[in-house]
Amino acid sequence: MLDWDHIFATRSSRMRASEIRELLKLLDQPEIISFAGGIPDPALFPDEEFKAAYADIFSDGTVNAALQYSVSEGYKPLREWLAGEMGKLGIACGAENVFIVSGSQQGLDYLGKLFLSPGDTALVTWPTYLGALQAFNAYEPAYDQLTLNGNRTPESYRAAAAKTGGRVKFAYLTAEFSNPTGETFDRAARERAIDLADDLDIALIEDAAYQSLRYDGESIPPIMALEIARKGGIEATRTIYCGSFSKTLAPGLRVGYIVANSTVIRKLVLMKQAADLHSSTINQIAIAHVASRHFEAQVAKIHAAYRQRRDAMLAALTKYMPEGTHWTKPEGGMFIWVALPEGMDGAALLAKSLETVKVAFVPGKAFFADGSGANTLRLSFSCANDQMIDEGIRRLGTLIAGEMQQAAA
């Protein structure tokens, strides 16, 4: 077999398999209760609405356009609808500020390519979305921990970045119901993020994949909305807002979007032209059909289901988890983050869990850019019914309690 390592680009050494994608394979094993994949429940997809949308496309004379090449910016009626939805969030913008990507993951890859040179620093939370780390890793950055509690100064970030021979280029965060923790940044933290971006003269990437999945609590304006209110318009903002239809309508169509000032959008369009020309035309048109007619009803449907499942998992954790474990209590999203006692290893626990109690989850270490967080794990409640949640958490709690007793012996 050929040895390719000396031929591959050096950046390829930083590419890692996604633990989450690997764990999705367990969904085909009926004996496994899986809390691993952070994916929407397919039973909640608006399948009838999409059947009607595609039927309309093939019957109303637009099919030729739907099957043809299209503009790199994205299907204009969809961008116009999105601009209207952004306005409801306090993000006043036009269709020219909206760029369609093949899933928000492609958007993160483009942003890494746009901003990062080897040795530059990306500020990310500890922990952060694993897919963002994968997207950014190919561009050979350094990472520093983004903290918004006032304990870090802008100069401390500059000094740390200088040691790697680059500079800080952006801060990346999920303000609403983050993956993996489910936590939300309050308004004060969002304002501090804007201050930090201004002080460091960097971009601020707001990953809003779960924006529509608030089940209770008080809504907080997106970071981009706060910055627009502060600076007077989107063209003066540093924030780059990344959204997706994957968690609300259908992930398989791979339609996401980026909202930003026109300077950033123009650069992203050039990247799209070089990468894949444009996202699927027919899928964009179908999304536009369904979103414009059924989005609010679809969101209400998934809210009711996911709220009940979140509540069931929180109740089961309270009932079955041993003393010494802690977990988040999210107001939305798909995830609960569990902290185990120091010294326990989530990866080792997963191996034993799959072998003995047949429960899957994601070990937390993968979400930390510095490799810490071994004693944490992520649970997703989106694809499990109440009975599965109760039984799965009971099994997992029993396993963790046994491991704790063994460690104490």
Image: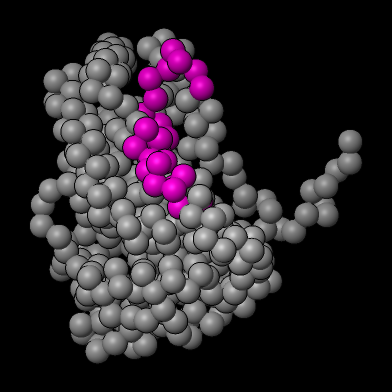
| The stretch drawn in magenta includes residue 51 | yes
Q: Can I make out residue 369 in this image?
A: no
Q: Nearer the viewer, residue 217 or 65?
A: 65
| The stretch drawn in magenta includes residue 170 | no
Q: Residue at x 62, y 78 (%)?
A: 270
Q: Residue at x 44, y 48 (%)?
A: 52
Tell me where residue 295 appears, x and y as whole percent.
30, 55
Q: Horizontally, is 356 left or right of 15 in the view?
A: left
Tell me where residue 90 appears, x and y as whole percent.
22, 74
Quarter of the view holding residue 72: bottom right
Note whether 127 is above or below 271 in the view shown: above
Q: Residue at x 61, y 67 (%)?
A: 65
Q: Residue furthest right?
A: 1
Q: Horizontally, is 170 left or right of 185 in the view?
A: right
Image: magenta residue range: 28-54
Q: Residue furthest left?
A: 218
Q: Can I make out residue 147 in this image?
A: yes
Q: Nearer the viewer, residue 220 or 347?
A: 220
Q: Nearer the viewer, residue 274 or 133?
A: 274
In the picture, the quarter occupied by the C terminus is: top left
Tell me where residue 11 appears, x and y as whole percent.
67, 58
Quarter of the view holding residue 82: bottom left
In the picture, the quarter occupied by the N terminus is: top right
Note whether 182 is above or below 269 in the view shown: above
Q: Horizontally, is 272 left or right of 348 in the view?
A: right
